[in-house]
Amino acid sequence: MQGARAPRDQGQSPGRMSALGRSSVILLTYVLAATELTCLFMQFSVVPYLSRKLGLDSIAFGYLQTTFGVLQLLGGPVFGRIQCPAILAALATLLGAVLSFTCIPASTKGAKTDAQAPLPGGPRASVFDLKAIASLLRLPDVPRIFLVKVASNFPTGLFMVMFSIISMDFFQLEAAQAGYLMSFFGLLQMVTQGLVIGQLSSHFSEEALLRASVLVFIVVGLAMAWMSSVFHFCLLVPGLVFSLCTLNVVTDSMLTKAVSTSDTGTMLGLCASVQPLLRTLGPTVGGLLYRSFGVPVFGHVQVAINTLVLLVLWRKPMPQRKDKVR
């Protein structure tokens, strides 16, 4: 199979990719990611209202979300009943797959002098070798960075998987109004990841950005505990988006730098598995918390967990690296 891909990569070394070629790949990657997420949230936005019409309460909806998270975590295809959004999502995803296969090089990360690549002629690890995958989590500094990523994302993950129910019950929003709110959320994510983080990374270290994201998480959690209207939530969204985007970008950067070039894809896969993991645990836990304590509990959990994370980061700083967040 490697021979079949050779013509596309022939004469183009990943370390010598032209600036124009790299910019084109990055732009295409952004477009594909935006298309995929747009199609995904088209479906997410209608499921809560459909479940409410079918008579599901917040706990039952949490079980539904947990089922989705389990399937997503395992990587299995989920085929439901066809809605216009589902057809459009399928076609757009197919187009994205074709573009990514034909236009993006097989490798875009240049070789490093300390990369622990497999020896020529040596045995190659199987794609499904779980021991090889788990071994990456035992590398120096990787377990702590990965734990910070999971722990800090967990409170926000609880809130976001229950947000559709909260928007109906607590904010009393209609489907169209909830859609506008999610569009606002998505626009802030695009601006933060595309412009803000890049500028900040040129002036501050990854350690400083990571601490700042956790600190803002704490402030947002305190405000969330006193939130009483959708207007209050709109005021909190910029801080929430900044923390969420910065945390994920910085931790992904740290984790991929901690492994060799040949293991970059595997590490990115592990990073991507955090969200499915939260979607597996979050809906059930979030549904129980919401029914028992209401919306303020998500702010309390946010403050408690991220305060512990911040203490850990201050007690033992993360390893400093020369590379900035890209």
Image (cartoon, rainbow, N blue to C red):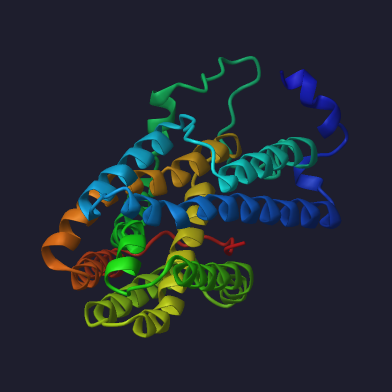
Q: Position of residue 172 (x, y in %)?
A: 33, 73
Q: Where is residue 311 in the image (x, y as percent from the top left)?
A: 24, 69
Q: Where is residue 286 in the image (x, y as percent from the top left)?
A: 23, 56
Please indicate, yes or no, whether residue 112 appears anywhere in the rendered image: no
Q: Which residue is drawn at 49% across and 68% down?
A: 176
Q: Is residue 171 above or below residue 119?
A: below
The front one of 164 and 269 is 164
Q: Quadrant of residue 96?
A: top right
Dividing the image into 4 quarters, which one contains the N terminus? top right
Q: Position of residue 131 (x, y in %)?
A: 38, 24
Q: Is residue 9 above or below residue 111?
A: above
**Relative side of 20 to 52, left or right:** right
Dividing the image into 4 quarters, which one contains the C terminus? bottom right
**Relative side of 273 to 20, left or right:** left
Q: Is residue 50 above or below residue 14?
A: below
The front one of 254 and 170 is 170
Q: Which residue is drawn at 35% across and 70% down?
A: 214
Please indicate, yes or no, whether residue 238 appears anywhere in the rendered image: yes
Q: Which residue is drawn at 67% across and 50% down?
A: 32
The front one of 240 and 202 is 240
Q: Which residue lies furthest to the right in this view?
A: 11
